[in-house]
Image (cartoon, grey):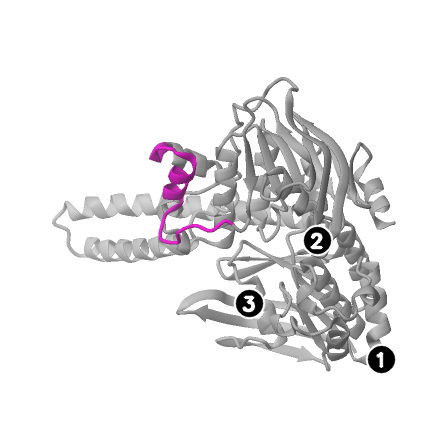
Amino acid sequence: MQKTISVKNIEYSVHEKPILQGISFRCADDERICIFGENGAGKSTLLKIICGELEQDSGNIEKQGHIRFVYVPQEFDHAYQDLPIEAYVKEKAGDTLSKKVHSTAKILGFNIEKHKDTHCGRLSGGQQKILALSCAFALAPDFLLLDEPENHLDIVSRVELVRLLEEFRGAIIFISHDRLLIDGVATKIGEIVQGKIFISEGDYDDYIQTKVERISGLQREHDARSKRIKQLSSTIVILQQKAFRGKEVSAYKRAKEELAQLKKEAKENGRPDEAQNKIKIASTEQGLHGGKLVMKIVKGLFEFENPKKRIFGDVDLEIRTGDKIVLLGRNGSGKSTFLKCLTSELELSKGEVTFGNGISYAYFDQHAQFDPELSAVDIVCQKLNMIDQEARSVLGMMKFDTPRMIAPIKNLSGGERMRLRFAIVFGQRPDLIILDEPTNHIDEVTWEILLEACKTSKSTLLLVSHDYEFIEAFAPSMFWVIHNQTILPRHKELNDLLEELKA
């Protein structure tokens, strides 16, 4: 007997603000549905309702057959921070499945045996995610619910995760913006837009085609509605200028009622092209020095003192204008530490970092905090020393409309706040831009905007990312690979480097 769940007319609000509005879809035990949408669209809320962690305001989840759910949230449960790894495995999967947990974790790049007495809170984000995923796989549920399972995983682990999900026997409902994961796993894609869900069959390319068709239809409806609003408005003005009676009175009332209804629909639906327009980022005009030296690292060594641990040593590298470099490495290999040494947030134990003459750089900090009462325009003016109009131009490149530019940032979505951070980095027009995992926690629209910014920018770029599709689209001129406590420039293909990192 096939096991299925039917999500029927789910409604959910927070502080009277609708989040999910009439969400309905069906998932059978042989299907893999990817749910995505802009940050704040309600994706995580929907998963929590399906698995019973949240109660919906209305609607229901109908189950056919006895169904076992396992839900892996976006972030590791803080309640287990002080628990040793083995105790966590025992609590989540039991003694009998411990071996299975260990073997799955090893495939994903984490040797539990070497860390079994370590408390979960001392693990890296990637190790915590692998631990949670490995327990979930070991339990072999009927329905596996995953909230951005790729988060914190290095690129090699992501490739292995795709393989494990392909082999998984059961239904999967997952949230992701990772193209590698979507194309490798999804049989259906559901996008949440303004509280509603739109399901399309097939992979990401099929979804894009379906979406284009849907948006085209909505655009036609919008154009027809706008045309009719103009006609009715003109008719009402003409009738108001006349001393009308009889049939004209009825016509006037009907026109007013129809106009009110159309305006209501226009307000509810908005412009269908607003979420689709991809605003190209203006090219920076600074930063070109004809292949001149941007940055040089000579005999770079970094060690933590207490306890003493070498992260990397004997590093000799240089960056020249026009380079597009991707730094690859496994979780915990020292990528972020290396970037902090370049930006002087950390000091090298030995060696030196030098910049070329007059070289400026900007570092992307995804955790940068801003005054929540200020607007995006205010913040860009402050950070980049710009006048109002200049700030609006920079934000426009990141697809901010005027209302969102001037709204307090506490009212912005997570994706919009990320775009604000990108605006500050690219708006500086520096010689060198350093980006540390910029695709973490961003939605589809922001992903596209960031990619366009990187591709059109004339700044030299140094990128750390575990997003396979983003790296491929970024098209680096070279890779730097951090492995076995050193960093070397490599000109191989990405897939070949991933195989090396697995070893």
The image quarter in which residue 387 lies: top left
Looking at the image, can residue 382 be seen?
A: yes
Q: Is 72 on the left or on the right of 253, as rendered? A: right
Q: Residues within 10 Å of mark 3 (few under 14, many from 20)?
A: some
What amino acid type is highlighted by mark number 3?
Thr
- Residue 433 is a magenta residue: no
Relative image position of residue 327 (x, y in whole percent): 71, 40
Q: Residues within 10 Å of mark 2 (few under 14, many from 20)?
A: many
Residue 45, disc: 3
Which mark lies nearer to you, 1 or 3? 1
Residue 96, disc: 1
The image quarter in which residue 459 lies: top right
Q: Earlier in the sequence, mark 1 or mark 3?
A: 3
Q: Which residues are magenta?
A: 368-389
The residue at 19%/47% (across/down) is 239
Q: Quadrant of the N terminus?
A: bottom right
Task: Give the SS element for disc 3.
Answer: helix
In this orientation, which residue lies closer to the viewer: 375 or 118? 118
- Residue 381 is a magenta residue: yes
What amino acid type is highlighted by mark number 1?
Thr
Relative image position of residue 8 (x, y in whole percent): 57, 72
Q: Residues within 10 Å of mark 1 (few under 14, many from 20)?
A: few
Q: Earlier in the sequence, mark 2 or mark 3?
A: 3
Mark 2 lies on residue = 182
